[in-house]
Image: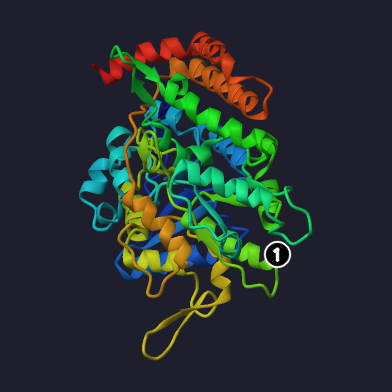
Amino acid sequence: MTLKKLLLATTAIAVLGSAVVPAMAQTTIRLVSKDLLTTNPDDVKEIEEIEAALKAQGHDIDIQTVDLPGGTSAYVDALGVMLLSGDIPDIIYFQGGDQKMAEQGILEDLNPWIEKSEHIKAALWPHNVERLANYPYLLYIYPPRAPQPVMRKDWLDQLGLQPPKTVEEYEALFQAIHDADLDGDGTKGNTLGLTGFGNTNELDSIFNQAFGVTGTWMKTADGAWVNSRVTDAEKAKIEFYARLAEKGLFDKEYVTNTFDVKEDKFYTGKAGVMFGSSPEVIDIYSGKMRQAHPGENIELTLLPIPSGPGGQGLAALDVSKESRGWAISSISEHKDEAFAVLDFMASKEGQDIDRMGFEGVHHTTDASGAVTFTDQISTWYARFFNAANWEPPVPLLSATGQAALDTIKANFVADNAFVWPAEYAAEVDAAEQVYRSWVAKFITGEASLDQWDQFVSEYNAAGGQRMAEYAATVLGQ
């Protein structure tokens, strides 16, 4: 018996054994999210404003927030335990762990609801549409995460260089940063051109297409599907990263850097270029850079996507499913009300609440209706959505942040990745671990690119070969 059937049976028994309760005008729904807590006054106030706005529209809904730990790993673990125990809120925010719940049948197919929605359908980004078609259980209305590089504008001006437009010009920029005394400490040759953290995903965002890594799956000369991880195009890209690291232009400590360490190297002038995962994050970096250098009024400039042997563009975007997002319980007795909440959050009024913060705190409105954001807006973040069709009364993003968003809008390319059946989980994880380990060794110099064939053999043995065989059945000829 699936978890869904068990819960439905339990609910039916409880109903049969209980007294009939008169219907109430107000409906109570339960909501759980990593970013909404009853202990956070801003969260509580936003929920109250949402409830008031919904009531004015004829939906008398009491939204009860379920508190779970806020850290990503702790939240995912606690949410999984809660759901598997049979405690299923009406609205659930997932940041992992959703697929096994979908397989148990406890997540609602959202596509029929969205099709007849008043607001959500018009608020979707193009990648949302494709992901919902492939996996209809999660809704995450945000621009795709597509890391893009930024650097101090005054440093670029000091170097006398134009923003780099090719792979070769990027290498020349990193070399110029390294060779100059931009931080003014009297020492040249001690500044990294580029820093990062964890893995090379950020770099891949702008360098994949330039080296011809066009998607997760690519065809060989004889027409066979292989993972791009083991292609000649991938090898050329990794060789580029390794050359940067060997010349002191890319941070060899990227594997052990935490997010905070990466940022600190950028703000303190130990590295000239850093990637921001979203336009909003890039604007946060701008604010933090100014805080680190009071009185200097430093601006960040967005660097363009480079062209290279393979072309130009942002990396192909995985549209197999959302990796995070909102779901509705398929066994909820209040699906209409649950969806009404999500649909409202995609409306102009809902976005005004979620994106602009509180009147008198994060923004003010004069007698003519003109809105002015206060300094407090820099600490505000949306709890629900970033609708594609919502326009703020005045710009929320800086010119640099807006340029990053425009780049994302102009460069969406769907990847050919797909959702793996559960029985392939071990192979997927093992092959990725082999890839990450070898990439780190190539970049740090622990291994030579002459050992590429050894890497490919290990990758295929770890699961890559079996994955490719399955991919051929999905992708066809």
The three-letter code of the residue at mark 1 reads Ala
- 47 is higher (above) or lower (below) than 296: above
**Quarter of the image that includes the C terminus:** top left
Percent across and percent down for residue 262 are: 66, 47
Q: Is residue 411 above or below residue 181?
A: above
**Front residue of 261 and 375:** 261
Q: In which quadrant of the rendered image does the N terminus lie?
A: top left
Q: How many marks?
A: 1
The kind of secondary structure element at disc 1 is: helix
Q: Do we see residue 14 in this rendering?
A: no
Q: Callout 1: few (<14), some (14-19), or many (20+) C-alpha neighbours within 10 Å?
A: some
Q: Which residue is disc 1 drawn over? A: 292
Q: Outermost residue, right direction?
A: 186
Measuring from the top left, give residue 367's x and y in whole percent.
40, 91
For the point 38% across and 51% down, which residue is it? 408
Q: Residue furthest left?
A: 116
Point out residue 77 in the picture as x, y percentages from the top left corner.
Answer: 59, 35
Which residue is at a point 45% across and 67% down the rendered structure image? 399
Image-based side of 354 in relation to 380, left or right: left
Residue shown at 41% from the left, 69% from the top? 52
Give residue 254's quadrant in the image.
Answer: top right
Res 445 → quadrant: top right
Q: Is residue 439 above or below residue 44?
A: above
Asked where in the image residue 421 lies, by quadrant, the reply is top left
Q: Nearer the viewer, residue 92 or 30?
A: 92
Position of 353 relative to 474 (above/below): below
Q: Position of residue 248 (x, y in %)?
A: 68, 39
Choose between 185 and 369: the one closer to the eye.
185
